[in-house]
Amino acid sequence: MKPKIDIDYVCALAHLQLTEEEKSQIAPQLKKIVEWVNRLEELDINASKGEVYSTVSFSAPFRKDDVQPSLLEEDVLTNAPEKAHEFIKVPKVIEEK
Amino acid sequence: MSLTSFTLSELCSLLETRKIKAEEVVTDYLKEIEEKDKKISAYITVLGDLALEKAKIIDQKKERGILAGVPLALKDNLLTKGVRTTCASRILQNFIAPYNATVVEKLEKEDAIIIGKTNMDEFAMGSSTENSAFFTTKNPWDLKRVPGGSSGGSAAAVASNMAAASLGSDTGGSIRQPAALCGLVGLKPTYGLVSRYGLVAFASSLDQIGPLTRTVEDCAVLTKIIGGFDAKDSTSSCEPIPDYQKEMMKKLQSLKIAFLQENMLEGIDEGVKEMYYHTLKLLEQMGAELYEMDFPSWDYALACYYIIAPSEASSNLARYDGVRYGYRQTNSQTFKEMYVKTRTEGFGPEVKRRILLGTFALSSGYYDAYYVKAAKTRRLITQEFMEAFNKVDYILTPTTPEPAFLIGAKEDPIAMYLSDKFTVSANLAGIPALSLPVGWTEEGLPIGLQIIGNFFQESRLFKLAFAIEKKVKFRKQN
């Protein structure tokens, strides 16, 4: 597969903004990496059996859904960049037209 | 003699019999850090006052834990309550963790003393610590060279006697590779053996916390303490944790060992290759049955890893948006602008590269071609391991293709990625792997050997590693 990496589109998805200079550096690097990982196409993946997405070799146990103590409000807010009373403050969410 | 030259196990017994005081130990370690860390730069944060204070309390205590008074270093992606945890990133530069990682709780329960937080590649993405947003750690064996990474600070601190032992995290080789480059023992445990609660996530299906130590025994002691079920990690296993230290001393019984077919060693450093064959010969003399094996899918392991790890990272790192914690760009008019500017200014180049790569691999139209294919390849790699373990008990490989390289030598990202050639497969399969030092190159740089075992076979790994360690006498040669 010959992928086309639209660097602006991928940046927008990832919420990152690159300068033109960064783009001209990172875009070819990404292209090279993607070409390099393309070698997976050589493999016969149909030989792969079993669960594709399972990451654990054991069955993860269920637990009772008991309420446990959680972090105190002040602990949660200690790292907030900006706060007002018991809330985290952010710039305006709704953009004006 | 400085107390810093004792191994962790030696320190434990000296402290247990109260022949020495925790305060003396910590004082000696802080002196060592004061003298050496200007050159080595292993630590991001040194907890001098806190450590001394804790030592004094421990000296007064009657009932004490196994690690009472032992100074340990932690990779700076492990959350420590009330202490800065930066991940070597500008985006978390001033982040004070509001709770402890489970491993930190476990160490503190045994009265260990956390002496500092160590440098790493930003968000554990790298093999040299050169991707740290703050500075590059130097290899204590040669200051012009890298200590490996991403747990490079943790490795350099232990190798230069600035900590009795340390914890790191391993996603594709980040404990074993620096252990090999710094002449230490490093373990990536079976996925699920050690709780990941409080480890800043990079690639959740691959990350594991493990120890970096001067001896196999030290590694066994720490693994027993940090291992075990934790309800706070949904991928934590209920497998009982044996007394590794005791198990390790038992006689080796079955010793069927797979070694790599020569084509798999193509292009690696000659010194590393020679040492690999030398160690295999040694094992043969010890009565091992050796089997030459080919693992064709390993050829694809790195490519598979560089789809899966960045994909998971792009999702995990979406949380850094400047809203609840971490750096925030304050000159933004709108929410979205803040989000983008915060991330753009907060992340370094390698982190951005991986987020973009992962975002691309998961994007519409490419998901099946990349992510699904990689997930299936991962399955193939695991199958190949399981087939091998039907025949043998261990698989031995060099830990790294070359010894510690020069700072600045690998500017091309793919060249850097190749450092993990022998280590990533164990992460993809979720099985345990340990690196131990087996000798030196002609220039006097340490060389590591990797022992890979089947799921939850840590006891066996320690047993074989301990036997090799006794033969090789790496520390005595030093």
Image (spheres, helix red, strand yellow):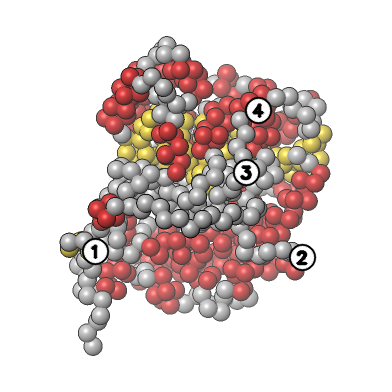
* B371 to the left or right of B341: right
Q: Amino acid at mark 4?
A: Met
What subunit carries mark 3? B
Binning the other alpha carbons within 10 Å of mark 2 as few (below 14), some (14 to 19) or many (20 upward) gives few
- Estimate the spatial distance between the alpha carbons at disc 2 and disc 1, rounded to whole Å: 51 Å
Viewer-nearest of discs 4 and 2: 4
Q: Amino acid at mark 3?
A: Glu
Q: Where residue B380 appears, x then y in whole percent?
A: 71, 59
- Res B248 label: 4
* Residue B248, visible in the rendered structure: yes
Q: Where residue B74 appears, x then y in whole percent?
A: 41, 38
Work out which quarter of the rendered image holds the N terminus of chain B and state it.
Answer: top left
At horizontal 42% and vertical 23% (from top left) the residue drawn is: B64
- Res A88 label: 1
Q: Quadrant of residue B68?
A: top left
Q: Quadrant of residue A61?
A: bottom right
- Is tag 3's residue or tag 4's residue first in the polypeptide sequence? 3
Which of the pair A64/B352 is nearer the observer? A64
- Estimate the spatial distance between the alpha carbons at disc 3 and disc 1, rounded to whole Å: 41 Å
Binning the other alpha carbons within 10 Å of mark 1 as few (below 14), some (14 to 19) or many (20 upward) gives some
Q: Are marks 3 and 1 in contact (CB under 8 Å)?
A: no
Viewer-nearest of discs 2 and 1: 1
According to the picture, the residue beneath numbered tag 2 turns out to be A47
Q: Amino acid at mark 2?
A: Ala
**Element carrying mark 4:** helix
According to the picture, the residue beneath numbered tag 3 turns out to be B239
- Is tag 2's residue or tag 1's residue first in the polypeptide sequence? 2
